Amino acid sequence: MNYPALFVQLLPEGLLVITALLLLGVAVATEAKTKRPLAIDVTVAISALGIAVACAALYYCPFRPESGTSLLVMDPLARVFKAVVLMLGLLAVLMPPARHEIAQPGEFHALLLFALTGLLLAVGTDHLLFLFVALELASLSLYLLAGFSRTAKAAEASLKYFLFGGVSAAFFLFGLSLLYGFCHTLTLPAMAAALDAGPLPPFAVAGLLMVVVGLGFKLAAAPFHYWAPDVYQGAPATSVGLIAAASKAAGVVVVVRLLLVGFEAAAGSAVWGGMKPGWALWLGVLSAVSMVFGNVLALAQTSVRRLLAYSAVANTGYVLVALAANGATSAAAALFYVVVYGLATFGALAITAAVERDRGDDSMHSFAGLVHRSPLQAVALLVFLTSLAGVPPLAGFVGKFAMFGAAMAESTSQGIPGLTWLVGLAAIMSAISLYYYLMVLKQAFVREAADSAPVAMPASHRLAVLVPAVLLVALGLFPAVLLSPLTQALLATLRGL
Amino acid sequence: MLLLSLLLIPLLGAAVLGGWSGLGKSSARHFALIWALVPLVLVVIIGSHRAFPATGVIDEWKSEWLPDAGIALRFAVDGTSWLFLLLTSLVTLFALAASLRLEQAGRAYCALILVLEGMLFGVFTARHFIPWFLCWEMTLIPSYLLIRLWGGAGAPRAALRFFIMTLGGSVFMLLGFLALQLAVGTMDFSKLADLAANHELAPRLAGTFASSGHSGQFLLGLVAVCVFLGLAVKLPVFPFHAWLPAAYAEAPTPVTMLLTGLLSKMGVYGLLRILLPIFPEVLPALAPSLMVLAVASVLLGAVAALAQLDLKRILADSSVNHLGYCAMAVVAAAAVHTDRSAHAAAISGTILQAFNHGIIASTIFFCIGLMEQRSGGARTLADFGGLRSRAPVFCGLMGMAIFASLGLPGLSGFVGEFLMFTGVFSLVPWAAAVSVIGLLLTAVFFLRMVRLVFHGPLDPACGQWPDLTNGERWILAPAIALIIIPGLWPQVLLHCLNADTARLLDLLRILP
Amino acid sequence: MTPAWTLISAFAGALLVLLLPARFAGWARLIALAASIIGAVAAAAACLTKLQHPDAAVWSFDREWIHDLGIRFHLAANGLSLTLLLLTGLVAIAGVLFSWNITLRPRAFFAFFMTIIGGVYGVFLSRDAFLLFLFYETVILPKYMLIAVWGSTNREYGAMKLTLYSIGSSALILIGLVVAYAAAGGTSFDLDYLASFKYAPSLQSWAFPILFLGFAVLAGIWPFHTWAPTGHVAAPTAASMLLAGVVMKLGAYGALCVAMPIFPQGFVEWRLVIAGLAVVGIIYGALTALTQKDLKFVIGYSSVSHMGFILLGMATATHWGLRGAMLQMISHGIVAGLLFGIAGRVVYERTHTRDLTELQAFDLWRTLPGAAIAFTLATAASMGLPGFSGFVAEIFVGIGVWQSDPWLILPVAVGIIVTGAFSLRAMHRAFFPVRKPTAEAATMLPPLTWPEISAIALLITFSAAIGLYPMPWVTLIDDGLRSPLFHSILSLP
């Protein structure tokens, strides 16, 4: 065990922890001295710096796969997604809560950094128990972040999130223990070999099912999504941004590693006319339920934040379609899509937060006449929502098309595409989703504004809106820039196993 | 070149009228009248050329339209066409002259009449279905507008009915020809006639539509019926004549002159140029039903005219009657194959009748127009009486035209009727016999008209009527001359047709 | 000038207009006009080049794009797309001219307008299924915006209905394309490759109707046509011209050049159903137009009827029928643009009504003779009177129907007659008054402005040109139909 090399590989996470501790220290010191909490701008600056340095460390540190262990895997997939999670975290940091919303900015950002650390660790591990610990680190931080603003709604959100999270964590752990009982090991490569050996006994299948349930909660797949609407509506915008983007992305990577890479043998099939029980079938069912629930319930929403929550459920459904196909290209497309989705939802949330602060509530009517008040914000909103709807030429369209195309191609045998039922449902549901996005855009572009004062948005907030918008347009025109590395990384990981 | 100029000059005149926005109404009417002299001159020049002996064609113009589909724009003048061209240019001049007094007629009116003239030239010289149909349909909008915009109170409905019924018939004609295009690959009238003469049409149709299981004869008959429908609305033949009385009555009188003088002749020309040469195989089978329709037109037209009180409607129904004779003659010529002279008589009689009726009917309408102007719009039988005492010259000339329409020997109307009846008697005796009743009824209603309008006590409303002015005499004189001369000396017209008639009969394999 | 200039000019125009500062908002229409003219000239130049050098290599632009999915950025032009490009260019110019006096947010208006034009150019030029679908979808949001912001009657409802139908049918297209891609091995989205792949007949039975229906809904197939009249009436004039004239042709083009070549056996199976629906559409559209009180609704329903002819021509699966369908696409594009332009802009701007009875009182023949003449000519073209483009298309479709399904010729005849009836009724009621001898002369309305005259003249000239001299157009269409895409369709019995 080459400890120095291992610590070098752990630098990003280490730097994040150091920054968090530093923040806490500075916050305590400043409060003791000035009797006032640390300024938000300072905490944002420190956190951002910390994340930036962690990113740099990730990039510049020598990449030695052989120095990894199963606890800390250093394959291209982990590297790429650590970078992604860090970037999404940076965006969240750049959109801090308003001064009056939270009492202790230092603690808030420290928790945010801890959550990021947990996500980073979860993305880069092959050891299931370590995965659980990392996910719990992230989750606990997120529960606290959700309730940080001490309003009634935030408290409700946080409590619901915690309760659901706790139960699903229990499911996950119990499922892991059952699987351990069958495989006698907790590292994914060894488990893959063990599962390959023969048909699974019922208790192992039950274990797998419980693991899938636990993961489903993390991704906000229906019917495990009940925490999402309240959390999206009640928690401070920054926390929601983190949950919607970074946490989701990390969650999908975990699912890919766990199921596609590790439990490949127990996949089963979701192909129409040839269905076999296994996680692919369960994911297919979850996907169908999520897409239908998410889109149908979103149609009735008037609160934009809740609408985005249900849209999150629906988008999980789309991603699961690609994962249910159980192939490398479709999984790569799913990873591409979840990044794009994260950027789009984050951007939409950012604008919603600004409008909410301006008007007082996040209903659709608050957006009336946005194009006249703040044209650039309206255009950014257009970019985000149309990317979510899957309208070209934005990255969301390419992502959806890639996912559905790859899923169909991967599941074709003897010239008959087997997942047509699922992809068909996805296409139709995606079409329906345009309706509710258009409702918001209609308010912004068609309706007249009540007054013509621009919507206030601090500089860092603007940056947090501009970067995703530009990226979505760029990735829409040149998707290969992200898709190729992801495909290569995934193939390398699959081969390595 | 001459032919192309003939076709384009009226359209050019219309364009000039359309673009010349400063032209006043009266000046426009005069301009159009002078412009319309040019086609007449051209027609006369064309008439002076020798015809090619083999085909009878005097002049021809052709342009490729869609070569790989075998569609070309082909126009040609032979003796028969020339006669119709002459008729067109004369009647148009006549109508424009009659319009000089029409106050509301301005640039648009004259432009439309010129366009109509150009399109009629096209119809009477087209030798391929596409240019035929192009010109045929393009007469619809100008006539519709002429009736609608300058007509009387009931004009909108009459114009609409005219348009829709004519369009309906044309659609069937189009579809019939499209089927032929598919089966034999051409819509050229001459080529189709040759194929028909060699009995090739029916088998080719049967081959193309083999999936329908019908025989070639049946299919060819179906196509013939479609084509007939298109022509029948124009002629008109009972029961497709419903549009005619209202349209003739509501249209302003000069337009009625055009309608009766020229547009109905399109139908006659079509019967001779299309129906007879291309469908001789199946016409004998269809002839009984078609003959019934023709005879019905003759009788019902005459009966209806008897019941009318409006002068224009009397004439309108009488037109149905007179054109019914043409239809009867053509159907008879197609129905049976007996001796050649009978056929020759029937066909030449039809063409003559077409020409003469054009001149006569437009003359009568012109006179009715004069009466309308003097009486301030009234034109029923009851409105007039004893005109002979006030306007003897007028009554004399109008009377001559009426008697010509009646078929009095010595006047042009007699020649055509005589030839037709001679032919039909030999071919389909019963039809001729029944149609004689039509002749008698025609005599009745015309003589009644003469009695009520010209003779009898002078109607107080006509008390101040002036006789014909000089201008009107100048206009009427050539018309009356054209009514008298062919009556006394038919050869002047017949010599144009004889060669063509002979050629047609050869084509139909009707041997002496 | 390669055909790529059509795309470049449209999108560049849209971008330039968006970036204009508020002070120069009046320049938006000039930039849009310039971009449209450049596009039309590029298309015309390409057509002429093709006519002069029929055997020259087809222009194409092919670049690697998303390698992992087999998607390439592949643009190319054959005879069919060239004619449609020219149509788009003409309608674009006319649309900008008819919108010359827009005062409400002109920059946004012309930006959305040019985006739609660019998207349409893109669809006609794409040879990769993903790229085609990308451009196809790009027009959906601008369509919504144009109708919802600048529209008239019932605009939000009309806009949403149109958009939802569009996006719903796009979902079907997506499913169909992805099925085709997957079943062909998941290696390439190239249209020619997908068309040449032999799919299993059982797959084609269900995949073809999905893909075809997706495109056909946008083409106004009965009974999924109800979005069209509502949407077109709600839209502002230029948008109606675009929608009826060009965007509906996207659906027809997709059905003809994507759905039919990819799944030919499926097409054969469903051919009679398509023909039947098309005929029902022709007659239903015509009959409904006969009863309308609003002039724009008459034109909207007449579009449904005319699109029926296009679908019928395609369903005959004969050379004549396909030619007729293509010609009708071009003809109807021009004529619908003309009719909407006159009704929506020339008349409505001045009279503020489109109700047929109310228009009678205006005595338009006397007070606005230019519009009356233009509408009369447009009606003649719409009816299929010879001398205009509609007639040539009608003959070809007629021959095609005779060739493949003679028993359908009677409903077609009925459809043509009813079309004549409603067209005449609309023209008759709207422009020509019922003459009352004692009525006072109505006040003269403002005469036609030069942009209106130019637009009308442009469209009428082209319709008459095609009607009187169709040879070059038919040559281009035949060249397109000779492509391997159509071999399997045209050789089917």
Image (spheres, grey):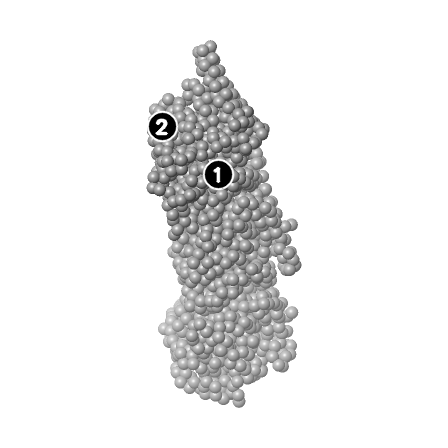
- Label whose residue precedes the other's in the sequence (1 or 2): 2
Which residue is drawn at the image coordinates 42% and 25% (left, top)? A141
Same chain, labels 1 and 2: yes
Residue B254 can be seen, yes or no: no
Q: Please indicate whether residue B433 sits to the left or right of residue C188 in the image.
A: left
* Circle 2: residue type: Phe
Toward the viewer: A79 or B207?
A79
Chain letter of disc 1 in the image: A
Q: Residue shown at 50%/85% (left/top)?
A: B343
Badge 1 local density, few (<14 within 10 Å), some, or many (20+)? many
Residue hosting label 2: A162
Secondary structure beneath disc 2? helix
- In the image, B402 versus C204, the foreground residue is C204
* Residue that numbered label 1 is attached to: A335
Residue drawn at x 41%, y 18% as measured from the top left: A103
In the rendered view, tell whether residue C439 sits above or below residue A296.
below
Give the percent coordinates (x, y) of residue C102: 51, 41
Left or right: A366 as drawn, with respect to B188: left
Expressed as whole percent of the image width and height from the top left, the position of residue B270 reads 50, 74
Q: Disc count in the image?
A: 2
Is residue C411 visible to us here?
A: yes
Q: Nearer the viewer, residue C154 or C374?
A: C154
* Percent position of residue B338, x then y: 48, 88
Mark 1 touches mark 2? (CB < 8 Å): no
